[in-house]
Image: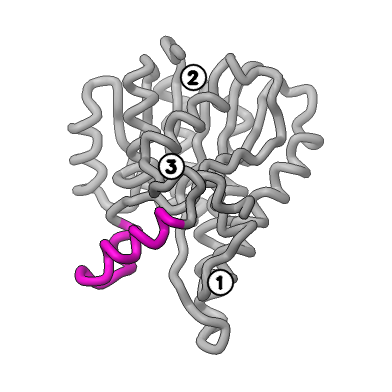
Amino acid sequence: MSFENKTALVTGASAGIGYGIAKALVDAGARVIITGRHAERLDKAVAELGPNASGIVADATKLADLRRLFDTLKADHGHLDVLIANAGGGEPVPLVDVTEQHVDDTLTWNLKSTIFSVQFALPIMPSGGAIVLIGSNASKAPPIGMSVYAAAKAGVRALVTGWVQEIKGSGVRINVVSPGPVRTPGLEGFFAAEEAEATFDFLAGQSTVGRIGTTDDIAAATLFLAGNTAGYINGIELFVDGGAARL
């Protein structure tokens, strides 16, 4: 699958799933712009990705940052072929401990960032462009303590269901990739070191293929939906979780 002469933006791509997607796009020939909130981490990721990658420090939850990001993209590249709206995240909090701040933060990280990334991207995307939103299989099978996060990711699915009608005729497709557990530094950070391996073994057991996901798994699915091979696929949610959400 080739992305030669394509310009792609991956938000929240200094590490983890976003970085894995950005690397796959670079390897497929795309010019890739990545964003992150921390300049040092972003610069390190760009250096590792190589000369076809560049980075812009931006917080996808802040509209001023998004305006600056897309103004820069338009000035430097003229248009955007592929948007991967990956920025997001969540923290495990049981219902009895949920606070107003937790709800506000989780919805901002996962819904506000996605809504406005897409809103700003569409005016500079030509017909044939593709948007992939990163959801989560938690929207179908929420782990204990992740109900607010799961609701936010279910909201991502709802956005796509509406947006495919709203942008009909633009020639831009929009789909969702919803990963299951993927071993990333972010996920490892949820667990104490002595608990991590046992937890990952448990998560692997929830998969019908007997293992936990990798960033390569998510990147492959994302590039498929972003590429011309998927030109007749629009408005779907593709679960990449070893079948866990279907059990």
Query: Which residue is denoted by mark 1 in the rendering?
Result: 104
Name the residue tied to disc 3: 11
Q: Residue at x 43, y 20 (%)?
A: 77
Residue 177 forms part of the magenta stretch:
no
Residue span colored magenta: 186-205
Q: Quadrant of the C terminus?
A: bottom right
Pick whichever of labels 2 and 1 is earlier in the sequence. 2
Q: Nearer the viewer, residue 124 or 93?
A: 93
Give the quarter of the image for residue 47: top left
Label 3, secondary structure: give it: loop
Give the left or right position of residue 33, taking residue 40 as reference: right
In the rendered structure, which amino acid carries the disc numbered 3?
A: Thr
Look at 33% across and 68% down and name the residue there: 190
175 displayed left or right of 92: right
Residue highlighted by disc 2: 78
Quadrant position of residue 229? top right
Q: Is there CB contact under 8 Å for labels 3 and 2?
A: no
Q: CA distance from mark 3 to mark 2?
A: 18 Å
Please tell me which residue lies in front, 71 or 145. Answer: 145
Asked whether 188 falls inside the magenta stretch, the response is yes
Q: Residues within 10 Å of mark 3 (few under 14, many from 20)?
A: many
Nearer-N-terminus badge (3/1): 3
Q: Earlier in the sequence, mark 3 or mark 2?
A: 3
Give the amino acid type for the residue marked by disc 2 in the picture: Gly
Query: Where 51 sits versus 33, above or below?
Result: above
Instruction: Judge the density around disc 1: few (<14), some (14-19), many (≥20) Cα neighbours within 10 Å.
Output: few
Determine the secondary structure under disc 1. helix
Position in image of residue 178 (x %, y %): 55, 46
